[in-house]
Image (cartoon, rainbow, N blue to C red):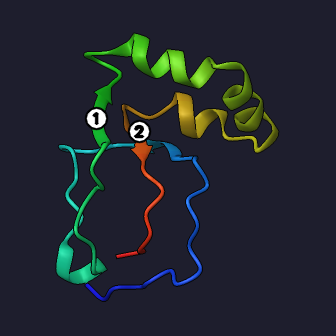
Amino acid sequence: MADWARKYFQPGGGDALLLYLIYGEFAQSPACPRGRYDTGGLPEGVEMTRHTRCDQPDALEYWATAATFHDLVREARLEDAVFGVPDMLRIQGVVRDPNSLQ
């Protein structure tokens, strides 16, 4: 992967907190093909977990009804898409503020 140097980089003292919730139906935790998407995979400090409505209904319910997220779901009229699917992927972690975008 090409190095994208940040020649004007100055440490800001803040790292990025990532949280992605992906609702759908997944046979297993999907992999991201490196060649197709030119990626080295998830960055250090970031994990992906799969939650199923059958095995872990509390996990799906917790995220779907969290106040801010629930407001977004309701405003976008996505209730059926979120509450009607069997699985959720959660990608979460902290990414350090790098001096390169490699």
Find the distance from the CA under tag 2 to the CA under tag 1.
9 Å
The residue that disc 1 covers is: 49
Q: Locate the N terminus and report the quarter of the image it occupies.
A: bottom left
Q: Badge 1: how crowded within 10 Å, few (<14), some, or many (20+)?
A: few
- Classify 32 as above or below 85: below
- Residue at left offset 41%, top offset 17%: 59
* Front position in the image: 46 or 101: 101
Please, what secondary structure does the residue beneath circle 1 have? strand
Q: Are marks 2 and 1 in contact (CB under 8 Å)?
A: yes
- Residue at left offset 21%, top offset 45%: 29
Q: Position of residue 82 (x, y in %)?
A: 55, 35
Q: Amino acid at mark 2?
A: Gln
* Front position in the image: 21 or 44: 44
Q: Is residue 43 left or right of residue 96?
A: left
- Residue at left offset 48%, top offset 56%: 97
Q: Position of residue 60 (x, y in %)?
A: 45, 22
Q: Locate the C terminus and report the quarter of the image it occupies.
A: bottom left
Please, what secondary structure does the residue beneath circle 2 have? strand
Residue at the farthest right position: 75
- Sequence-wise, which precedes: disc 2 or disc 1? 1
- Residue at left offset 60%, top offset 35%: 80
* Front position in the image: 14 or 66: 14
Residue 36 quadrant: bottom left
Q: Is residue 102 left or right of residue 31?
A: right
Tell me the number on the disc at residue 92.
2
Q: Nearer the viewer, mark 2 or mark 1?
A: 2
Residue 74 quadrant: top right
Q: Position of residue 100 (x, y in %)?
A: 41, 74
Q: Is residue 65 left or right of residue 84?
A: right
Q: Amino acid at mark 1?
A: Thr
Tell me the number on the disc at residue 10.
none
Q: Position of residue 66 (x, y in %)?
A: 64, 19
